[in-house]
Image (cartoon, rainbow, N blue to C red):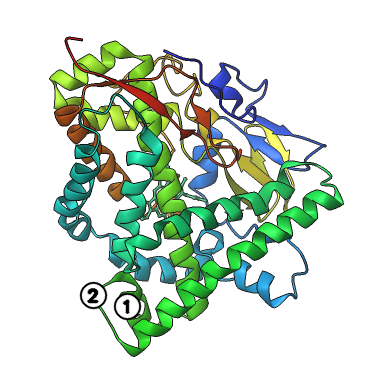
Amino acid sequence: MTDWNAHPAHFWMHGHRPAKTVEFAEQTGFWTVSGYSETHQILSDPVTYASDIGRFFPQGDTNDPLVKQLTEGNILQMDGAAHRDRRRVVSRAFTPKIVAAMEPRIAKLAGDLVDGLVGRDEFDFVSEVAYPLPISVIAELLGVPVSDRDLFVYWADKLLESKNIYHEAEPSQDVQAASMAALREFVPMVDYLNQHTAERRRQPREDLLTMLVQADMPDNEITHFGILLLFAGHVTTTLLLASTIMCLDRYPDVARQVREDRSLIPGLIEESLRFVSPVPAIFRATAVDTEIGGHAVPADQLLMLALGAVNRDPRQFADPEVFDITRDPNPHLAFGRGAHFCLGAPLARLEGRIAMNILFDRLGDLRIETPPVFHPSPEMCGPRHLPVKQVQRGD
Ligand code: HEM
């Protein structure tokens, strides 16, 4: 069992709770909401609390075609009818039938990865399983070559790096320049997806990109959706898988129980999502003057909803610091809620369940002996590398 050294921004992982559930910070200029009921209220009212938050995160010259291309047409930042229309189209790719049909393919991918680990005493769980599985699933879903997966990881890193500018109240010129440079390195991903989209227009295939082209979605929105899937859909699921292994190491009794009774796996995944929420914060903007948890909040304010802390709010979860896979219900907000609720949640859960079953079937216990290296960005929470030792049962 090892200490977790999560990013300091993830204060709840270090056993702290903010003094107030709704708080304005002069230094950052935004409100932090860490209470469950307040966050629930905000996510349930997309009219008062809008997702169109791009103006709070200006990056470079907004007239720059590059910046425009990277900021316009992102479903996560759409509101109202435009969002509903877009969501109606893209959700066709995530119907329960489509997700269920992916099960054998996910099992095959996971099985092949795990088989390569049988008999290996030590390995990095992230690079061997937690990262290749979700990225391969998304690449196959989208219809781009799985062999390009290292490129997606590189681009995802650059995108996160480009956001470093927001982690300081007054970023220096160097930080601003480095952030813009990272953004430019991310541009080939836009070109990559544009090329694949153009190809599908010429030659339709049986894949998600073709489906989006045939639904008459504009090219920039298809590109944005591809980026969202290749980025949000894989980094998050990678973190979920790795954090679950981290929790099993910290709570060996739970690991023993689940090994013996696999019907506990869905509860394990839900508790892992609550305990180490991969997306630790999301943002909204007040569209009108409002009140949150007894605080008057004017219009046009940026709100950071600290999902990681929200999911450990003692007013909602009994003994929130206890990792309890039998919590029922477990209404965590790790996938958000309401209009923008994560479209990939059923897929992420399925991948989690399949991977855990196969791991228990084919491998010994995975023990962590050195503190896991956490993702360096405060926007993500969970191990970036997870060296594990495989211990055969009975050893
Ligand atoms: C939205 C978390 C996996 C696709 C979201 C949101 C959260 C989230 C918190 C809401 C953002 C907001 O309200 O501002 C997660 C976590 C995942 C995961 C924790 C894994 C453990 C996936 C996967 C996919 C995906 C696998 C797709 C393959 C999406 C999409 C949206 C979204 C398309 C935008 C929905 C909209 O704006 O209407 N996700 N996600 N996610 N997620 Fe996920």
Q: Which residue is mark 1?
A: 210
- Residue 69, compared with residue 140, is above or below; it is below
- Residue 344 left/right relative to 60: left
Give the percent coordinates (x, y) of residue 62.
Answer: 74, 70
Note whether residue 337 is visible.
no
Name the quadrant containing residue 69.
bottom right
Local secondary structure at mark 1: helix
Residue depicted at x 82% and y 37%: 26
Check the picture and name the quadrant holding the N terminus: top left
What is the CA distance from the residue labelled 2 to the residue labelled 1?
A: 7 Å
Q: Residue at x 66, y 65 (%)?
A: 184
Q: In which quarter of the view is residue 375 placed?
A: top right
In the displayed structure, would residue 316 be above or below residue 355?
Answer: above
Q: Position of residue 10 (x, y in %)?
A: 59, 29
Local crowd at mark 2 within 10 Å, few (<14), some, or many (≥20)? few
CB contact under 8 Å: marks 2 and 1 = yes
Is 366 on the left or on the right of 16, as rendered? left
| Front residue of this view, candidates 131 and 40 | 131
Q: Is residue 261 visible?
A: yes
Amino acid identity at mark 1: Thr
Q: Which residue matches tag 2?
A: 206
Q: Quadrant of the C terminus?
A: top left
